[in-house]
Image (cartoon, rainbow, N blue to C red):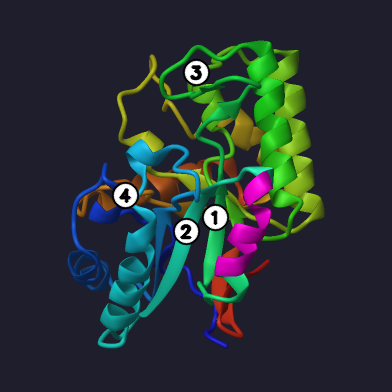
């Protein structure tokens, strides 16, 4: 077992995702410069049918990505982990499970970048979210976490980058997400990438302070990650993340590695 640490980043994107830059080696160099002890790559996982393929590596690049990380990690003083950030779709549950259990990746991360409708999907990054979208977001997120496949929930408040009203719907959906995470001991991520995007008024797009104040009140555990897509962004938001966690008085989960799998100390 690798002891728990507060010097980590578990949400990292490289050139493999097609909307990021930097090689695995360059990121590891920067992580060592920052004296990180645990460093995880979480590239967007490609799906067998090519869904969301504009922002994913090709399927035949998966072995290259995993080998690249494993090779680079052997020469480092820090522990380097192999992971994927996943947009969960129920029909691919066994596909995700295969990579976690058979290919021995160290962890999977759940994220909801696209709200699914019967004939289309919408994104908090690009579309105005309706009340129905907010409920669908909650349902997708909880359904994914309920599989037990995912180590933590990335940017759980991403929907509120577009749905800005903190009304009864927003509060109720947030309570459901937070309570599920508490009941199943799943850390929620304070995401640094949203902190370096243009603000909306005087607020971050995400993390949304009102969501995290509620998480603090309810007793959820958090982790904080950069979600970097550029090498320089690994360090850029670290101070902001730390300040935000302290200001919201959030309880922290500390990552560790147990039996070759990412876990947390609460």
Q: Which mark is residue 67?
A: none
Q: Which callout, 4 or 3, points to the residue nearer the camera?
A: 4
Q: Is residue 197 above or below residue 249?
A: above
- Which comes sooner in the sequence, label 1 or label 3? 1
Q: Is residue 215 magenta?
A: no
* Real-space Cα separation, disc 4 to disc 2, in angstroms: 11 Å
Q: Is residue 18 above or below residue 251?
A: above
Tags 1 and 4 touching, CB below 8 Å: no
238 with respect to 101 (left or right)? left
Q: Is residue 44 above or below residue 248?
A: below
Point out residue 186 in the picture as x, y percentages from the top left corner: 69, 56
* Real-space Cα separation, disc 2 to disc 1, in angstroms: 6 Å
Residue range of the region highlighted in magenta in the rendering: 91-99
265 with respect to 6 (left or right)? right
Main SS, magenta region, reads helix
* Real-space Cα separation, disc 2 to disc 3, in angstroms: 25 Å
Q: What residue would you read off at disc 4?
A: 17
Q: Is residue 12 above or below residue 206?
A: below
Q: What residue would you read off at disc 1?
A: 109
- Which comes sooner in the sequence, label 4 or label 3? 4
Q: What residue would you read off at disc 3?
A: 162
Compare residues 126 and 6 and report the one nearer the observer: 126
Q: Residue at x 25, y 49 (%)?
A: 233
**Residue 14 seen anywhere in this rendered image of the structure:** no
* Real-space Cα separation, disc 1 to disc 3, in angstroms: 22 Å
- Which comes sooner in the sequence, label 4 or label 2? 4
Tag 1 secondary structure: strand
125 with respect to 144 (left or right)? left
Q: What residue would you read off at disc 2?
A: 84
């Amino acid at each position: 077992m690798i002891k728990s640490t507060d010097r980590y980043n578990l949400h990292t994107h490289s050139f493999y995702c097609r909307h990021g830059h930097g090689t695995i080696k360059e990121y590891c160099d920067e992580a060592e410069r920052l004296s990180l002890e645990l460093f995880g790559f979480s590239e967007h996982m490609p799906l067998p049918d090519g869904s969301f393929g504009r922002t994913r590596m090709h399927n035949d690049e998966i072995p290259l990505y995993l080998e690249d990380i494993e090779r680079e990690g052997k020469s480092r003083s820090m522990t380097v982990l192999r992971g994927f950030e996943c947009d969960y779709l129920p029909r691919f549950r066994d596909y995700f499970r295969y990579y976690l259990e058979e290919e021995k990746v160290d962890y999977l991360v759940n994220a909801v970048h696209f709200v699914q409708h019967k004939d289309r999907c919408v994104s908090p990054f690009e579309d105005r979210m309706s009340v129905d979208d907010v409920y669908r977001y909650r349902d997708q997120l909880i359904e994914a976490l309920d599989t037990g496949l995912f180590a933590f929930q990335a940017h759980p408040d991403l929907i509120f980058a577009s749905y800005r009203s903190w009304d009864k719907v927003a509060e109720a959906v947030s309570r459901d997400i937070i309570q599920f995470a508490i009941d199943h001991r799943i850390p929620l991520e304070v995401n640094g990438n949203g902190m370096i995007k243009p603000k909306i008024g005087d607020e971050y797009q995400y993390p949304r302070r009102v969501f995290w104040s509620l998480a603090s009140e309810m007793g959820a555990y958090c982790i904080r990650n950069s979600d970097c897509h550029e090498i320089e962004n690994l360090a850029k938001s670290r101070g902001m993340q730390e300040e935000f966690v302290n200001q919201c008085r959030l309880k922290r989960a500390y990552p560790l590695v147990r039996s070759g799998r990412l876990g947390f100390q609460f």
